[in-house]
Amino acid sequence: MSKALEGIRILDFTHVQSGPTCTQLLAWFGADVIKVERAGEGDATRAQLRDIPEVDSLYFTMLNHNKRSMTLDTKQPAGKAVLETLIRDCDVLVENFAPGALDRMGFSWERISQLNPRMIVASVKGFGPGPYEDCKVYENVAQCAGGAAATTGFDDGPPVVTGAQIGDSGSGLHLALGIVTALFQRTATGRGQRVQIAMQDAVLNLCRVKLRDQQRLARNGVMEEYPQFATGQFGDSVPRAGNASGGGQPGWILKCKGWESDPNAYIYFIAQAAVWPAICRVIGREGWITDPAYATPRARLPHLMQIFATVEEWTKTLTKFEVMDILNRDDIPCGPILSMKELAEEPSLRATGTIVEVDHPERGPYLTVGNPIKLSDSPTVVRRSPLLGEHTEEVLGQLGYGDEEIAALRAGRVI
Ligand code: CAO
């Protein structure tokens, strides 16, 4: 079966997490992704958080599937010449170097588009043009600068970053969409273009509902679905909402049986208006169905936390999976807090290819997250990440380099 991006060649100059997330997706869709790494050391993540000495870390293997790796010193003249050949040969260059690094290497957008006018040049930086444009940025910097940390956590505590890598992987997802959109436009214009993602912008895009709330707060001074509504304590910016839902239906995380010893014995419970009578029946509070203090969503708002506490008395008597089963019989939305261990062992995620076991010549089998985007005509087969420089000679051969030229590049430590 063909692949959606078959025939597209990517010059993958990415490292760490944001850029590699993007190029891994493109590789899963069938693009030929050539990861160009520093000779000798490669992507820094190969050696970061290692669980096995001298073996590529899971950090690296889990972000670089289905790619080829070549080493190249792009600061030597002979390396620059190889890079020029690659630029002429590829459709897309993806990079997430520090600001200005590609220019310092001698490959500005103008020069790249001179070499190959059809080339799409896609970049991740921490910030867009403005006071911070020259800063180096990692995940949590973006979470803090993009509005996520200010709005995450509890009201009486400090800002909190989230485990979901919305700064890095979130930026990579945005970048991938920008690239395929530019590829689509190229079919009509014949021209390449720049695709630029600032991590701050990507996080802010994912925090869109919080900017919604900022404007609601400015207009009305309160937000009824926030836990702060009961006490009337709002400042002038969106507060941390604890586990409030962020949507139109109030929700909270409730303890389940075993919570005293199991840190994940909890369930997310949603007091959806449409199923309020069913909720009351399940927890044995039929009186609330008609009681004017509880019968309507507006009447419930001032004492939501007391309602959640009452529901919790019921959820504490059952496991999170029992609560899930019982509530879903009545279409009451809820979500068990699944630990990473439970997710790793979940058979349905294995069956869909969302969790995949991959074999690696140096580390043996390991688990990874497969392609979460399922295309019916372009199925994903997850292949292990490449060893450093595993495909250097293969790629150079395809570019027309002969054995002697390759040997000279190796002797000069260009590759
Ligand atoms: N051959 C020769 N030199 C190479 C090379 C190669 N194949 N690949 C990279 N280099 C050079 C770069 O040209 C750069 O040199 P200069 O500093 O002389 O210009 C140097 O290696 C270091 O690159 P860098 O500054 O990008 O790397 P760093 O480790 O210092 O910074 C990071 C890492 C992530 C902070 C920075 O790249 C960055 O801010 N990127 C943009 C934002 C981003 O993607 N952040 C997410 C990272 S994931 O949390």
Image (cartoon, grey):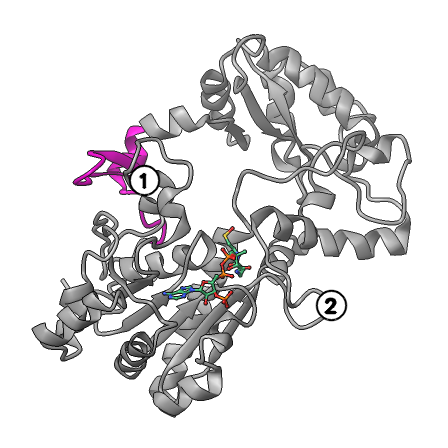
- Label 1 sits on a secondary structure element that is strand
Indicate the amino acid at tag 1: Thr
- Label 2 sits on a secondary structure element that is loop
Q: What segment carries the magenta color?
A: 346-373
Q: Residue furthest left?
A: 403
Say the numbered circle drawn on residue 368: 1
Q: Is residue 345 depicted above or below 138 in this figure?
A: above
Separation of residues labelled 1 and 2 (CA atoms): 38 Å
Specify whether residue 203 is painted magenta: no
Q: Is residue 263 depicted above or below 158 in this figure?
A: above
Image quadrant for the C terminus?
bottom left
For mark 1, does the 10 Å Cα neighbourhood hold few (<14), some (14 to 19), or many (20 or more) residues? Answer: many
Q: Mark 1 or mark 2, which has the lower sequence index?
A: 2
Q: Residue at x 24, y 63 (%)?
A: 30
Residue for badge 2: 131
Frontmost residue, 251 versus 117: 117
